[in-house]
Image: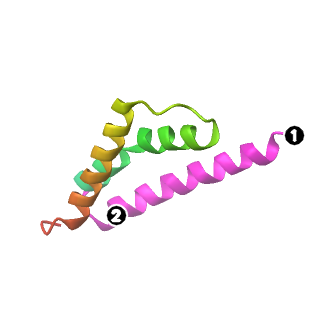
Amino acid sequence: ALWPALVAVGVIDMSATASYLAAIAVGPLAIAAILASLYPVITTILAALFLRERVTRVHALGIAAAGAAVALIAGSSVL
């Protein structure tokens, strides 16, 4: 009964790895590494959405700061 979920997790994991490899091939490694290090934010958001985990104020501030960091990196003209 868990096979569809396991396959989905595997496909998502392989897609993430392929995306990371494409990012480091196209752009600077420093930016790709910084953005890849934000994966705990996605885990926290998914846990809140699907498992109804509580997001504390500290977590919410961290998520907002990570979002601001991504926006600043994306808007940077140094790329």
| Residue placed most toward the observer, 19 or 76 | 76
Residue 59, x across and y down, in percent: 38, 33
Whichever of labels 1 and 2 marks the residue nearer the N terminus, that label is 1
Q: Main secondary structure of the magenta part?
A: helix
Dot 1 falls on a residue whose secondary structure is loop
In the rendered image, the residue lying farthest to the left is: 78
Q: Give the percent coordinates (x, y) of residue 47.
A: 56, 37
Which region is colored magenta?
Answer: 1-29
Separation (CA) of disc 1 from disc 2: 38 Å
Residue hosting label 1 = 1
- Taking the spot 50% from the left edge, 53% from the top edge, the residue there is 16
45 to the left or right of 37:
right
- The circle on residue 77 is none
| Residue 13 x, y percent position in the rendering | 57, 48
Type of amino acid under label 1? Ala
Magenta-colored stretch includes residue 18:
yes
Is 21 magenta? The answer is yes
Instruction: Tell me: residue 30, above or below residue 47.
Output: below
Q: Quadrant of the N terminus?
A: top right
In screen coordinates, is 75 left or right of 10?
left
> Mark 1 or mark 2, which is nearer to you?
1
Q: Secondary structure at mark 2?
A: helix
Answer left or right for 33 relative to 10.
left
Amino acid tagged 2? Ala
What residue sits 31% from the left and 38% below the top? 61
Q: Residue at x 64, y 53 (%)?
A: 11
* Quarter that holds the C terminus: bottom left
Instruction: Please state which of residues 49 and 6 is positioned toward the viewer in this rendering.
Output: 49
Residue topped by disc 2: 25
